[in-house]
Image (spheres, rainbow, N blue to C red):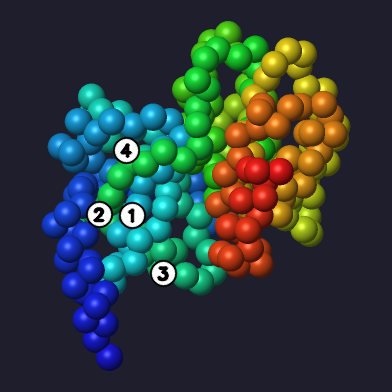
Amino acid sequence: MVDLKGKVMGSAIRVAGRNVEVDDVVGLSPRLRLLRLRGSVLHRMEWTPGDKIKLHVGDGAMRSYTPARVDPEQGMMEIAVHLHDRGRASAWAQSLRPGDTVSFMGPARSMPSLREAAPWAVFLGDETAIGLARALVDAHEATTEILGAVELDPQDIPAVQALGLSLDAVSRDGEHGRALVDWLAGTTLPRGPGVAWLSGEANAVLALRTALIERGLDRRQLCIKPYWSRHGKADRKKLERGALVA
């Protein structure tokens, strides 16, 4: 059956949104791809590291992504995509080839980058937040010490180095977030008023938030953005609201 509603929405997005062209698709690991997009609209796009966009992934469906890099001078944007075993966005990303047209809307505010120089910052997240990690790390001041880790399935560990991230890659063994909590427990955080960015799976983010507060960080030092929950979208929204107000 033809999805007329999806086709109408898809056409509207292509008209009302911004269109760019796939310049390259780079394999970072078995389940991570870097989409390199180019277009004249990117020359004049106002973007702050941590902002998100919504990509049209076919049949009127939109998915949120945080660009890993935007270069207005070159008219270029890079987006890291995690390929799930199922899902519309994964199938769409795997089908992309150089020369294809991609439509998007935004950007919009999401995770804040450093508003002012901080002595240190730590990033903790999973493979879905690897693009966000790239954007935030690139934007830090030279005087800010950056440390942190990205948790991935073992086969995707090479993606951290392939993306040029100066963060540790930790292998997932069992429950999401456990390797990050272990990494944090074994890490001495620098002195001074630092910042912690937490992203990825919602339950893991909540566990990391608790661990950092127990280490003495103030809630105002924490920047939190869960991207997904292993228990579903409603659980992610519930945990995100709780993490931001508690």
Q: CA distance from mark 3 to mark 4?
A: 22 Å
Residue tagged by mark 2?
102
Secondary structure of the residue carrying tag 1 is strand
Residue 104 left/right relative to 41: right
Say which of marks 2 and 1 sits in front. 1
Q: Taking 145 as reference, is 33 above or below it? A: below
- The amino acid at mark 3 is Arg
Label 2 crowd bin: few (<14), some (14–19), many (20+), radius 10 Å:
many
Secondary structure of the residue carrying tag 2 is strand
Asked if disc 3 and disc 4 are in contact, CB closer than 8 Å, the reply is no
Residue tagged by mark 4?
77
In this view of the protein, can residue 7 be seen by the observer? yes
Q: CA distance from mark 2 to mark 4?
A: 12 Å
Q: Residue at x 65, y 43 (%)?
A: 245
Q: Residue at x 79, y 41 (%)?
A: 210
Dot placed on the residue nearer the N-terminal end, 1 or 3: 1
Dot placed on the residue nearer the N-terminal end, 2 or 4: 4
Across and down, in percent, residue 208 comes to 75, 42
Residue that sits furthest to the bottom in the current view: 1
Dot placed on the residue nearer the N-terminal end, 3 or 4: 4
Q: Taking 143 as reference, is 43 above or below it? A: below
Q: CA distance from mark 2 to mark 3?
A: 15 Å
Residue tagged by mark 1?
55
- The amino acid at mark 1 is Leu
Asked if disc 1 and disc 3 are in contact, CB closer than 8 Å, the reply is no
Secondary structure of the residue carrying tag 4 is strand
Asked if disc 2 and disc 3 are in contact, CB closer than 8 Å, the reply is no
Q: Which mark, residue 88?
A: 3
Q: Residue at x 47, y 70 (%)?
A: 87
Secondary structure of the residue carrying tag 3 is helix
Dot placed on the residue nearer the N-terminal end, 2 or 3: 3
Q: Quadrant of the C terminus?
A: top right
